[in-house]
Amino acid sequence: MTIISIHQPGYLPWLPFFKKIMDADLFVFLDDVQYQKNGFMNRNKIRTSSNSLWLTVPVHANLDSNLNQVTIDTKSNWPIKHKKTLLINYSKAEYFVEIWTHFEAIYDTKFEFLIDLNMHIITVMMELLNIHTKTILSSELGILEKGSNRIIEICKALGADTYISGSGLPGKPYLILDDFAKNNINVKFYDFQYPVYKQHFEPFVPNLSAIDLLFNEGNNSKNILLNSKTSHSD
């Protein structure tokens, strides 16, 4: 059995993204799909003393731009703002110093394309979470189909017989399950149960970037993610 999962590489992704990578034999970064404004491709949430806050990377994108074509607004001082915001809100977290050494250099690097920034961050976060799943970019496969058929063709190209999908939008309603069955591909829907872990502010706030877990739990982050629960449905 070969299990794959597929998702767009976003900015500072949250825990369900990394759980899907962890549980797959092969993970496909969907980099050649249309950029989604106000999605998670260029932003995510972090914890603050009052609740949470969006960190957004300013970009240049047309309505029909693919993610791997989107450029970053290099005239903006967003790296300084993001560094300052992370320092203000996490400097007292237990593992801040240890984890920050891996991220500070990222914000000191000039990236032209959003995809390069996102992939660099994801690679660092996978290393910190000790995730060694094999990965590939969808653009390397040259598959032109759209929608549900695109997912099926990716599975077929990679010899996968099981596909992990999110249970919400755009996952479950997006897929034509009869077509997956005809191609002998089993679909497992994940309903991620967000784990409660130690945060340096109270009360606990879920659905944040995985960087929140790393700053607060350090080396224990992998075990927390590994033991997090997912409700499965076919």
Image (tube, rainbow, N blue to C red):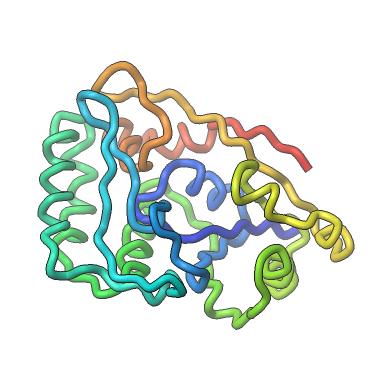
Residue 6 place in picture, x, y as percent:
59, 59
Residue lying at the far right of the rendered structure: 182
Residue 113 place in picture, x, y as percent:
30, 73
Which one is in front, 223 or 172? 172
Which residue is pictured at 80% across the width and 54% down the height? Answer: 177
Left/right of residue 64 with respect to residue 145 in the rendered view: left
On screen, 52 above or below 21? above
Asked where in the image residue 122 lies, by quadrant, the reply is: bottom left
In the rendered view of the protein, which quadrant contains the C terminus? top right
Left/right of residue 188 with respect to residue 127 in the rendered view: right
Residue 92 place in picture, x, y as percent:
15, 29
Asked where in the image residue 157 lies, by quadrant, the reply is: bottom right
Number of numbered discs visible in the structure rendering: 0
Left/right of residue 29 with respect to residue 45 in the rendered view: right
Residue lying at the far front of the rendered structure: 63
Asked where in the image residue 233 lies, by quadrant, the reply is: top right
Which residue is pictured at 39% across the width and 25% down the height? Answer: 197
Which residue is pictured at 42% across the width and 44% down the height? Answer: 14
Left/right of residue 39 with respect to residue 166 in the rendered view: left
Residue 217 place in picture, x, y as percent:
32, 32
On screen, 181 above or below 74? above
Which residue is pictured at 65% across the width and 42% down the height? Answer: 167
In the rendered view of the protein, which quadrant contains the N terminus? bottom right
Which one is in front, 26 or 64? 64
Residue lying at the far bottom of the rendered structure: 142
